[in-house]
Image (cartoon, grey):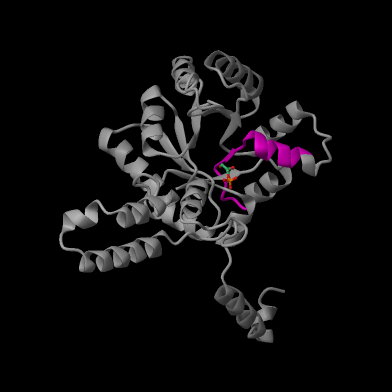
Amino acid sequence: MKIFIDTADLDEIKEACSWGVVDGATTNPSLIKRAVDKRGGSVTMESYIREILETVPGPVSLEVIATDAEGMIEQARLLYRKFSPYGEVVVKIPVNPSLDESGRQDFDGLKAIRTLKSEGIPTNATLIMTPEQALLAAKAGASYASPFAGRVDDYIRKRMGMRAGVDFQKGDYFDHRLVKALVRMKLRSLIGKADSISEVYSSKDVREILSTTQDNGIYSGVDLVAKILRIYRNYGYKTQVIAASIRNARQVREVAEVGVDIATLPFKVIKEMVRHPKTLEGMRLFTEDVVPSYKRLFE
Ligand code: G3P
């Protein structure tokens, strides 16, 4: 599995690249805003992005800001032309750039991806929340598809009535297996009280339990990633899956277990991956146990 760093913060990018574990980077307008804010707004965007590209040893996703196909295509060409001399540019295109419910622009992202593919400009279809969107992105010719695992977990927890920042924090692991087990227990107890399976199947309580603990058959962000991978493998799509919106180390392990191509990780999640209290304790013990004669070997 490749690891990309999910940030536009050059200090973080440089440090993480020095650890030798970074294969690429992903940015988006929110991450660029955070990086610019950190520098007090004093950033020359062109040279800043150029430096990111020169630092990262692999693809760097840069996002367009237009929301119509023509605008996205123009911006993608510009980003690609301007920054390709400095590194491997991938253009991030929202899978569905609509800003309202009208549906007028629902397919503009896919149209842009299709055109850019024909021009040889690699794209990363972003803001993917369903396997259906990922399937369309692959058909349109996206080089990468980015399912937002953490945001799907947020969505399901919200449906369950959990409040962000109160009942769970952004970095908390979402235990979807526990939820599934609880649902199973609850359904079993409802079946026990009913006369027939069909009565339970159509009961309001059952509908309620099922619809609040999943998103139309998706049980978690990791489940979304696993389902997309299965679909792509079924048909041999070449689109690589980037697990995005990853919030903690255990989520990284789970997307690796299901065989994701790439996980794009915030700086602090990469740091979390290397730590364990017993590793720290072991290091302290080894350090205390060094005998002088062994120490002299290195002098
Ligand atoms: O990779 C997408 C990412 O930057 C969004 O992350 O944690 O804001 O959902 P998050």
Ligand 1 shows up in which quadrant of the image? top right
Residue 288 appears in which quarter of the rendering?
bottom right
Q: Is residue 253 left or right of residue 163?
A: left
Q: Position of residue 213 (x, y in %)?
A: 40, 54
Q: Residue furthest left?
A: 196
Q: Is residue 230 left or right of residue 252?
A: left
Q: Position of residue 292 (x, y in %)?
A: 69, 85
Residue 201 in the magenta stretch? The answer is no
Q: Is residue 224 left or right of residue 192?
A: right
Residue 25 in the magenta stretch? The answer is yes
**The one of 150 and 20 positioned closer to us in this rendering:** 150
Relative vertical location of residue 181 with respect to residue 77 in this rendering, above or below: below
Quadrant in the picture for the C terminus: bottom right
- Residue visible at 68% across and 73% down in the picture: 298
Q: Position of residue 31 (x, y in %)?
A: 66, 40
Q: Is residue 235 left or right of residue 272?
A: left
Residues rendered magenta in the picture: 19-36
Q: Position of residue 152 (x, y in %)?
A: 47, 47
**The one of 264 and 205 positioned closer to us in this rendering:** 205
Relative vertical location of residue 2 with respect to residue 76 in this rendering, above or below: below
Relative vertical location of residue 268 with respect to residue 76 in this rendering, above or below: below
- Residue visible at 33% across and 57% down in the picture: 205
- Residue visible at 49% across and 27% down in the picture: 96
